[in-house]
Image (cartoon, helix red, strand yellow):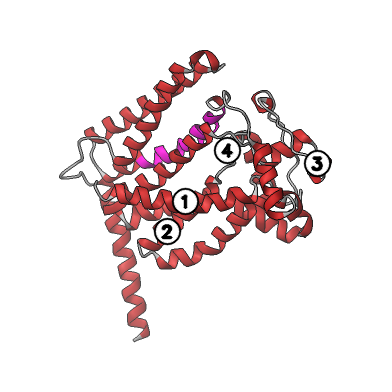
C-alpha cells in the first residue's frame, strides 16, 4: 500500500509539472483584453504621484527625473500588455505580475524624492517609544542578545523578506493560477498603500535618527527635531550584531544599495509579511504556511533588532497589514 501511495504521489507531481509547462506555452482561448487589477493599482499610484509631482514641481529638486521614471514604467506596462495580446499564453501572462513585483525595488527609493517637503517626525516616534517602553528597544535589543548565532538568525530573517515574497509569488503562479490576479492585486496594493503613507509621514527609522542625533543623547532621552536634515544626509549607523556573518553582509549590502531614510512607520516589512502569510493560509497552502512561519517570525523580530524600525513601527505594521488585507481582499472579490 505504501508503495502504491508513493507511486500515485509521484505521478500526480509529474502530471502537475506537465500541466504547468503546457499552461506556460499554450495560447489562451479567452485572453483578457484590458489591464490586470494589479496593473490598475500600479497605474493609480503612478498617475496620482505624477500629478503630485507636477503640483509640487518647484519644491522637489529632482522632479524631472521622477516624472521621467513614471513615463518609463508606463511604457514597460504597455509593452507587457502588448506582448501578451500578441502572444496570449501563460508565460506572457505571468511576466506581467513578475515584472511589477520586480519594479517595487524601483518604487521604494523613489519615495525619497517625494516626501522631502514634509518635516521629519522621528523625534515624535522616538519620544513615544521612550514613553511606552521606558527605553529604545531598537537600541538595546541587539545589546541584550549579541551572540553571533542569534545575530545571524536575525539577519537571515530580515533578508528572507525578499525570499518570502518570491516564494509566495511563484507558489501562487503555479498552484493558484485561477486566483493569481486577485492575489497579486492584494500584494501589490499593500505596497502602494504603504508608499502613500511613507510620502505623507516621513519617519527615517532608528538606524538613521540615532546616527544623526548621537547614541549618547538617545540613551539620555534627548530626541531633537531634525526638521529637513534627512533631505541632505543619508548616513546611517553601523548595523549591530555579528559583522562577519554571511546574512549580516547580505543585509548590509542591500541597505547600502537601496535603503533611504524614508519609510519606517508603519513597518512595510511586517505588514507585507503578514499579508503574505494570510494569503498562503487562506489559499490553503498549509504545508507552505508551516514552512514559512518560522521565517516570518524571525523577519518581524529582526526589524527592531537591526534597528531598521522602532517597536511601534512593528505594532503599526500588524494593524496596517490586517487593514490592507481586509480592504484589498474585499475589493478583489469584485474583479
Residue matched to label 3? 215
Residue matched to label 4? 263
State the predominant SS element of the stretch in magenta.
Answer: helix
Contact between marks 1 and 4 (CB within 8 A): the answer is no
Q: Quadrant of residue 73?
A: top left
Please report the residue visible at 32 percent of the width from the left and 64 percent of the height from the top. Answer: 14
* Label ID, residue 321: 1
* Label ID, residue 278: 2
Contact between marks 1 and 2 (CB within 8 A): the answer is yes
Residue numbers of the magenta segment: 97-112
Please report the residue visible at 42 percent of the width from the left and 58 percent of the height from the top. Answer: 278
Please report the residue visible at 57 percent of the width from the left and 26 percent of the height from the top. Answer: 118
User: Relative to residue 122, is residue 145 drawn left or right?
Assistant: right
Ranked by sequence position, the earlier of labels 2 and 3 is: 3
Q: Is residue 102 magenta?
A: yes
Rounded to the nearest angstrom, the CA distance separating label 2 from label 4 is 23 Å
Task: Categorize mark 1 by other alpha carbons within 10 Å: few (<14), some (14-19), many (20+).
Answer: many
Amino acid at each position: 500500500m505504501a508503495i502504491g501511495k508513493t507511486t500515485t504521489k509521484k505521478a500526480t507531481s509529474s502530471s502537475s509539472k506537465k500541466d504547468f509547462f503546457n499552461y506556460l506555452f499554450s495560447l489562451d482561448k479567452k485572453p483578457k483584453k484590458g489591464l490586470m487589477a494589479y496593473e490598475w493599482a500600479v497605474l493609480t499610484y503612478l498617475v496620482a504621484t505624477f500629478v503630485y509631482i507636477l503640483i509640487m514641481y518647484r519644491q522637489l529638486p529632482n522632479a524631472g527625473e521622477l516624472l521621467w521614471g513614471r513615463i518609463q514604467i508606463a511604457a514597460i506596462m504597455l509593452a507587457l500588455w502588448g506582448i501578451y495580446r500578441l502572444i496570449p499564453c501563460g508565460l506572457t501572462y505571468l511576466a506581467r505580475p513578475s515584472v511589477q513585483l520586480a519594479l517595487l525595488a524601483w518604487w521604494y527609493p523613489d519615495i525619497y524624492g517625494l516626501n522631502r517637503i514634509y518635516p521629519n517626525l522621528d523625534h515624535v516616534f522616538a519620544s513615544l517609544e521612550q514613553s511606552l517602553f521606558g527605553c529604545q528597544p531598537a537600541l538595546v535589543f541587539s545589546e541584550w542578545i549579541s551572540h553571533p548565532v542569534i545575530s545571524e538568525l536575525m539577519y537571515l530573517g530580515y533578508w528572507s523578506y525578499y525570499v518570502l515574497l518570491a516564494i509566495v509569488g511563484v507558489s501562487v503562479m503555479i498552484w493558484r493560477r485561477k486566483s493569481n490576479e486577485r492575489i497579486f492585486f492584494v500584494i501589490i496594493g499593500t505596497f502602494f498603500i504603504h508608499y502613500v503613507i511613507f510620502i505623507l509621514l516621513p519617519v527615517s527609522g532608528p538606524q538613521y535618527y540615532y546616527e544623526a542625533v548621537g547614541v549618547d543623547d538617545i540613551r539620555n532621552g534627548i530626541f531633537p527635531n531634525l526638521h529637513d536634515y534627512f533631505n541632505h544626509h543619508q548616513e546611517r549607523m553601523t548595523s549591530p550584531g555579528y559583522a562577519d556573518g554571511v546574512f549580516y553582509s547580505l543585509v548590509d549590502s542591500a541597505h547600502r544599495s537601496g535603503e533611504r531614510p524614508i519609510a519606517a512607520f508603519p513597518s512595510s516589512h511586517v505588514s507585507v509579511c503578514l499579508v503574505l502569510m494570510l494569503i498562503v493560509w487562506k489559499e490553503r497552502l498549509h504545508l507552505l504556511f508551516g514552512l514559512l512561519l518560522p521565517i516570518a517570525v524571525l523577519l518581524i523580530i529582526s526589524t527592531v533588532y537591526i534597528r531598521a524600525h522602532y517597536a511601534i513601527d512593528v505594532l503599526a505594521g500588524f494593524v496596517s497589514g490586517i487593514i490592507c488585507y481586509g480592504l484589498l481582499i474585499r475589493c478583489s472579490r469584485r474583479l
